[in-house]
Amino acid sequence: MKKSEYATMAEREQTYWWHIGRLKIIETYIKRAQAGRRKLKIMNIGCGTGGTIDMLQSFGVVDNVDISEEAIKFMRKRGYKRLTKVEGIKLPFKDRTYDLVGAFDVLEHIEDQTGALKEWKRILKDDGAIVVTVPAYQWLWTDHDVSLHHKRRYTTKRLAEAAAEAGLKPEKKSYAIVFSLPLVVGFRFLNKVLGRKADSETSYVNIPNWANNAFTKMLYGEAKLHRKIKFPFGTSVVSILRKAD
């Protein structure tokens, strides 16, 4: 990401419907994973510009890692602590340290997904959980994925298979951000027809405030439904993973 984009991303994480709604869905899964426990020790993989940190801190102490030195510098300027710059997938933390590992739209960026999942499993306590989100459906792949350095997109089955290779199993898995699927399909089809190329900024479609608010409320409603059901389609996949052994 360009240096100039960090402040823009941080602002959008506070205002854009996708970020706000996804955060509420993630919170729902963390509440399920924690099973009423308090003061968790949490690892936040790929903290980026910090959009998930405040929510995670409501559950306990959060350590944040990122491969980007610029992201770490940006977060320090914002006043956040417990930040670590890492190289690749290796994490400088002891085995069985964390109650919860969060990896929100991170795994799709990593070439060695099995190695990454094994590393997250290594630092996880035996009764801990990994909460992960990834983009859905390889058939939705476009130049936008290339610009964001994605390696793949997922189905719930593909994510479960990747987890199994690392000795993990899903406690719950579902598609998410359900209402947006026909919108994304239509938008990407239109781009293809018009010959428009995607870049790192095209994931944000400028919409009126009323629509932004309406979409946010829809995802808040979806988050409540995730407590009881799993969805058969959506533009994201979300899962709680635990050690299989």
Image (cartoon, helix red, strand yellow):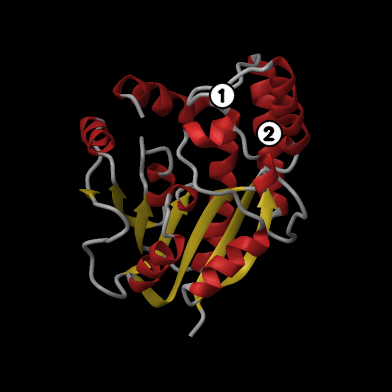
Residue 187, how many percent across, how many down?
A: 71, 25
* Residue 121 appears in view: yes
Q: Nearer the viewer, residue 21 or 166?
A: 166
**What residue appears at the point 69 percent right and 52 percent down from the top-left corner?**
175
Whether the residues at callouts 2 and 1 have beta carbons within 8 Å, the answer is no
**What residue appears at the point 28 percent right and 45 percent down from the top-left corner?**
67
Q: Is residue 203 above or below residue 227?
A: above
Helix, strand or loop under label 2: helix
Dot 2 or dot 1: first in sequence order is 1
Say left or right for 233 vs 120.
right
**What residue appears at the point 66 percent right and 60 percent down from the top-left corner?**
156
Q: Quadrant of residue 169?
A: bottom right
Residue 173, how many percent across, how many down?
A: 64, 62
Amino acid type indicated by mark 2: Lys
Mark 2 Cα shell of 10 Å, populated few (<14), some (14-19), many (≥20): some
Mark 1 Cα shell of 10 Å, populated few (<14), some (14-19), many (≥20): some
Residue furthest bottom as drawn: 245
Q: Is residue 117 above or below residue 56?
A: below
**What residue appears at the point 78 percent right and 34 percent down from the top-left corner?**
182
* Residue 173 appears in view: no
Residue 20, how many percent across, how many down?
A: 55, 35
Q: Is residue 30 above or below residue 189?
A: below
Amino acid type indicated by mark 1: Ala
Q: Quadrant of residue 31?
A: bottom right
Q: Is residue 165 above or below residue 105?
A: below
Q: Which residue is mark 2?
A: 217
Q: Quadrant of residue 209?
A: top right
Mark 2–mark 1 distance (CA, rounded to whole Å): 27 Å
Mark sitting on residue 198? 1
Q: Nearer the viewer, residue 181 or 64?
A: 181
